[in-house]
Amino acid sequence: MSFGKAVKIGMLGMGTVGGGVAQIIERNGELLAGKTDINLTLQRVLVRDPSRRRAVDLPPQTYTTDPDVVIRDPAISVVVELMGGIEPARTLISAALKENKDVVTANKDLMAQHGRELLQLARRCGRNIYYEASAGGGIPLVRPLKHCLVANRIKCIIGIINGTTNYILTRMSCDDMDFQEALARAQKLGFAEADPSSDIEGRDAAYKLAILAGIAFNCPVDPGELSIEGIKNVTRADIHYARELGYTIKLLAIGEEKPGGLVLRVHPALVSLAHPLASVHDEFNALFIEGDLIGEAMFYGRGAGALPTASAVVADIIDAVRSYERADKGLYANNLGKTKLLPVSVLNSRFYVRFLAQDRPGVFGALATVFGDEGVSLDMIIQKRKKNGIAEIVLVTHDVSEERFNRSLEKALRLPSIQPDAGVFRVLA
């Protein structure tokens, strides 16, 4: 049985997420129609190889290798871009908007780097771009920030928004794995790509932060201006010592409003075990938000995967159809203001440092003197294990300016008893 208004959509790409969209329409189509009075049909799908077997068997005439067949089909009202990458996705989305079609995309790279120009084009064309799946996978983040929290002045957003790195750090913490072993496990289970560099170096999280910060703080954000650190330098020893101190280590994406502008950065940090983000494990993601009206809130769930991400795509398709019927244009094409991005150096932070030092008298005193000379107050300084005459010294600072801490660290690493390969991470306030 089918019911509801018939809506034909076109899809550009049918990989993992595209296959998930087709599965949802096939499996839950009647459920969707019952809830929304909208009956979705995949009218045309752009693929490289029409003969390849796919997750859902569509009629052969559905597939095409010509993008114009999808974009120019007058029966199609919504074009779903799931190709990934910048080009040809950027060109095809622009063409679809000019053909008077709304666009749904899960393309985080494109929306982070070129979202502003595409949203402006959508506004000029009287159309919309919906991109919920680009930032949080299956977790609703874009819609709550744009609608549910629109009356709030957002003070900060703090997110675990990369499932690969969170899985790796979880396995290092819970299973006592080293980095390479945990990465191999993530790759075996499909949580990490064969080339995981975008994830472990923090770029994937930075793209998502650029999208979310642009919405939360109503400003254009260039991901190239963000401070980014990955997780390659997190060792099993750091995981152990963090736990002893009452923390876990997470890769965080943080946006904060400060006097004069925004500070946006991605980096590993020690998170108190009492903080809600500390309990976000494996491939799960979460975004912690503080607003002036709502106070604190957190969104949690699977940030990636075929069906979770496809769930967000289908929700955007339904929104696009409803908005089209209401002639509700510009819903997602914000008139973004301008906000200055400030360097991380303006922040005050707490720091965790793990030094390797020669096990001899006076080392503690020398370190304390160096940090004291720069006005860096130490919360604790402890000596850990010794091996072959080398001791590990762990210290945690009180709040200090980034510039002052960096000066003291440089001096400490010049001490003859201190080896140069220190582990340094911020501590989430």
Image (tube, rainbow, N blue to C red):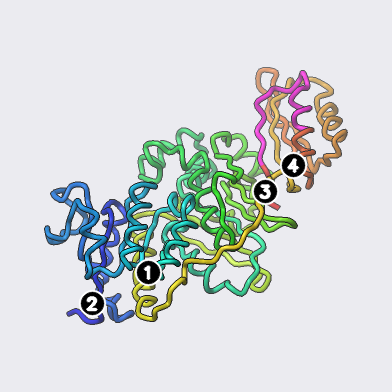
Separation of disc 3 and disc 1 at Cα?
40 Å
Which residue range is magenta in the image? 408-425
Q: Is mark 4 on a helix, strand or loop?
A: helix
**Disc 3 designates what residue?**
246
**Can you identify the residue that label 2 sits on?**
6
Viewer-nearest of discs 4 and 2: 2
Q: Which of marks 3 and 1 is nearer the N terminus?
A: 3
Type of amino acid under label 2: Ala
Does the segment drawn in magenta span residue 427?
no
Question: Is 230 placed above or below 44 here?
Answer: above
Which residue lies under the disc numbered 1?
A: 315
Measured Cα–Cα span from mark 1 to mark 4 = 42 Å
Q: Which of marks 1 and 2 is nearer the N terminus?
A: 2
In percent of the image, x 36 and y 49: which residue is there?
84
Mark linked to residue 129: none
> Quick one: label 3 or label 2, which is nearer the N terminus?
2
Q: Between 393 and 334, which is closer to the camera in this rendering?
A: 334
Q: Name the residue under label 4.
A: 402
- Asked if the stretch drawn in magenta spans residue 414, the answer is yes
**Helix, strand, or loop for circle 2?**
strand
- Please report the residue visible at 47 percent of the width from the left and 62 percent of the height from the top: 120
Is residue 306 shown left or right of residue 26? right
Question: Compared with residue 110, is residue 74 higher up or lower down, i.e. above or below?
Answer: below
SS state under label 3: loop
Image quarter in which the N terminus is found: bottom left
Amino acid identity at mark 4: Glu
Could you say which quadrant of the image residue 401 lies in?
Answer: top right
Task: Sort mark 3 into few (<14), some (14-19) or many (20+) by Cα contacts within 10 Å.
Answer: few
> Mark 4 vs mark 2: which is more N-terminal?
2
Residue 80 place in picture, x, y as percent: 32, 61
